[in-house]
Image (tube, rainbow, N blue to C red):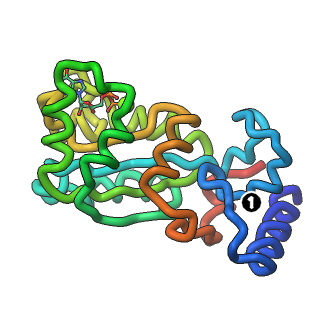
């Protein structure tokens, strides 16, 4: 019921003003959030995260298998593109790691070829996708995770996943324009969650 109400408002709002900026993290118009942006007040089935297949993953033709894992888990793809990331974009993306000794090598690796960036949506998608991706160092990543199944060294760990709600919001805004993300209704939603 509540979900239908929110959906109706969302549809009315998008048809009334296509130019209104939707909240990139939740898919909800910013105005609907009423200034309450704490994680607990967000409609959590619309939580969003940024996943990227890094240049090694693209070169090794792993894009399809990585997408498949998120699809089969039940998450919803709301944004997807392939690009050659600029140094400027990567330095913003990895700004917290600037002081690390591996930072120059990391930027060289990430700009060595195209990446495929995606935004996935769903209940606790940030936390769940970190588990699906596995430990930063593939040598410590569990089998069954992307890194645990497809890589063995930290310098080539195939995939990126946002590590927090705040990180996801920042990264989605960095990599995507609002109009590149689509709000769409999935026909299986009654079979993947209930509120
Ligand atoms: P995360 O990708 O699991 O969130 P972060 O600590 O945020 O891990 O590091 C970002 C990326 O930097 C890693 O995914 C990996 O590509 C690279 N990286 C992290 N630690 C090392 C290291 O010790 N040597 C080389 N590259 C590293
Ligand atoms: Mg990280």
All told, the count of numbered labels is 1
Q: Is residue 109 above or below residue 155?
A: below
Q: Residue at x 56, y 49 (%)?
A: 48
On the rendered structure, is 105 left or right of 10?
left
- The answer to which image quadrant residue 81 occupies is bottom left
- The answer to which image quadrant residue 181 occupies is bottom right
On the rendered structure, is 164 left or right of 195?
left
Q: Is residue 10 above or below residue 27?
A: below
Residue 79 picture location, percent across and down: 47, 64
Secondary element type, mark 1: loop
Ligand 1: give its quadrant. top left
Q: Residue at x 50, y 46 (%)?
A: 49
- The answer to which image quadrant residue 72 occupies is bottom left
In the picture as drawn, the residue positioned furthest to the bottom comes out as: 15
Q: Nearer the viewer, residue 30 or 71?
A: 30
On the rendered structure, is 120 left or right of 114?
right
Q: Residue at x 59, y 39 (%)?
A: 124
Q: Alpha-carbon neighbours of circle 1 within 10 Å: few (<14), some, or many (≥20)?
A: some
Residue 127 picture location, percent across and down: 51, 34
Q: Is residue 84 above or below residue 127?
A: below
In the picture as drawn, the residue positioned furthest to the front comes out as: 88
Q: Which residue is mark 1?
A: 29
Quadrant where the N terminus sits is bottom right
Q: Residue at x 42, y 54 (%)?
A: 175
Residue 170 picture location, percent across and down: 52, 42
Residue 152 picture location, percent across and down: 12, 30
């Amino acid at each position: 019921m509540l979900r239908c109400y929110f959906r109706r408002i969302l549809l009315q709002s998008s048809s009334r003003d296509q130019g209104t900026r939707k909240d990139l993290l939740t898919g909800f118009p910013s105005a609907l959030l009423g200034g309450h942006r704490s994680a607990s007040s967000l409609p959590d089935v619309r939580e969003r995260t940024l996943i990227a297949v890094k240049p090694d993953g693209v070169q090794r033709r792993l894009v399809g298998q990585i997408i498949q894992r998120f699809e089969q888990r039940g998450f919803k793809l709301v944004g997807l593109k392939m690009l050659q990331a600029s140094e400027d974009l990567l330095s913003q993306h990895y700004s917290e790691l600037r002081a690390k000794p591996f930072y120059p090598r990391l930027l060289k690796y990430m700009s060595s070829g195209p990446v495929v960036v995606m935004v996935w949506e769903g209940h606790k998608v940030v936390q769940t996708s970190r588990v699906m991706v596995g430990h930063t160092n593939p040598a410590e990543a569990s089998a069954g995770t992307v890194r645990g199944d497809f890589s063995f060294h930290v310098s080539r760990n195939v995939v990126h996943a946002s590590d927090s709600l705040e990180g996801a919001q920042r990264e989605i805004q960095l990599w995507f324009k609002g109009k590149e993300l689509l709000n769409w209704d999935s026909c299986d939603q009654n079979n993947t969650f209930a509120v």
